[in-house]
Amino acid sequence: TFNGTWKVDRSENYDKFMEQMGINVMKRKLAEHDNLKITIEQNGDKFHVKESSTFRTKEIDFTLGVPFEYALADGTEVSGSWNMEGEMLKGTFTRKDNNKDLTTTRIMVGGELVQSYSYEGVDAKRIFKKQ
Ligand code: MYR
C-alpha cells in the first residue's frame, strides 16, 4: 500500500532531469533541498495526495485512469492520468506548453517509496521514507 506520509530521503539524477525540463540552475539548487513530503490516501481507485515542500503545499484528488490537470512546483502545467500496472502506479502526463510527455512511476521497494521520472530521454528517481 502507498498510504502514509512519505518524506524524500535521496534523489538520483534529479538535477539532470530538472535541467531537461528546462528549469534554471537557481531553482534546481533550491529544489535539491525541497524537503518534499507526499501524503497518499488510497481508497480503491480513488486517491487523495497532499504534496508539501519548501515551494508550496498542494492537494489533489484523482481516480485511476481518469485524466486530470496538475501544475508542477515550477509552474509547468501538465495533464494526464495515473494507472495501476501490477504493483506499480504509472503516471502518463503531457506538458501543456510543448505537448511533450512526462512519465512517472511509484513503486514500493523494501519499505521505501520509489518515484521515477522520465522526460525526453532523461530518467531520475526520488526515494521516500515513511514518516
Ligand atoms: C501526485 O500524484 O503527486 C499528483 C500528480 C502528479 C502529476 C505529475 C507528476 C510528475 C512530477 C514531476 C516533477 C518535476 C519537477 C520539475
Image (cartoon, helix red, strand yellow):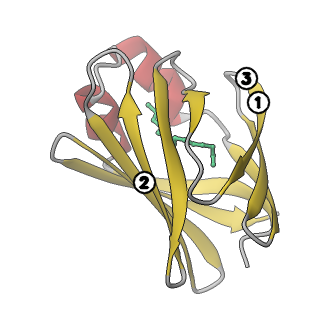
Query: Is the C-beta separation of discs 2 and 1 under 8 Å?
Result: no
Name the mark nearer the viewer: 2 or 3. 2
Crowding at dot 1, Cα within 10 Å, few <14 / some 14-19 / many 20+, comes out as: some
Query: Is the C-beta separation of discs 3 and 1 under 8 Å?
Result: yes
Q: Amino acid at mark 1?
A: Lys
Asked if disc 2 is less than 8 Å from ligand 1, the answer is: yes
* Element type where label 2 sits in the image: strand
The quarter of the rendered structure image containing the N terminus is bottom right
Say above or below: 23 vs 36. above
Q: Amino acid at mark 3?
A: Arg
Q: State how far apart marks 2 and 1 are (Cα).
A: 18 Å
Q: Which residue sits furthest front?
A: 66
Q: State how far apart marks 3 and 1 are (Cα).
A: 6 Å
Would residue 32 be found to the left or right of residue 33 on screen? left
Question: According to the image, label 3 marks what residue?
Answer: 56
Q: Which mark is residue 58?
A: 1
Say above or below: 116 vs 30. below
Q: Earlier in the sequence, mark 2 or mark 3?
A: 3
* Element type where label 1 sits in the image: strand
| Residue name at image x 76 percent, y 57 percent | 47
Asked if disc 3 is less than 8 Å from ligand 1, the answer is: no
Q: At which x and y percent is residue 39?
A: 80, 53
Crowding at dot 3, Cα within 10 Å, few <14 / some 14-19 / many 20+, comes out as: few
| Residue name at image x 72 percent, y 67 percent | 45
Q: At which x and y percent is residue 98?
A: 26, 19
Question: According to the image, label 2 marks what residue?
Answer: 104
Say above or below: 9 vs 42. above
Q: Amino acid at mark 2?
A: Thr
Name the mark nearer the viewer: 3 or 1. 1
Q: At which x and y percent is residue 89?
A: 53, 67
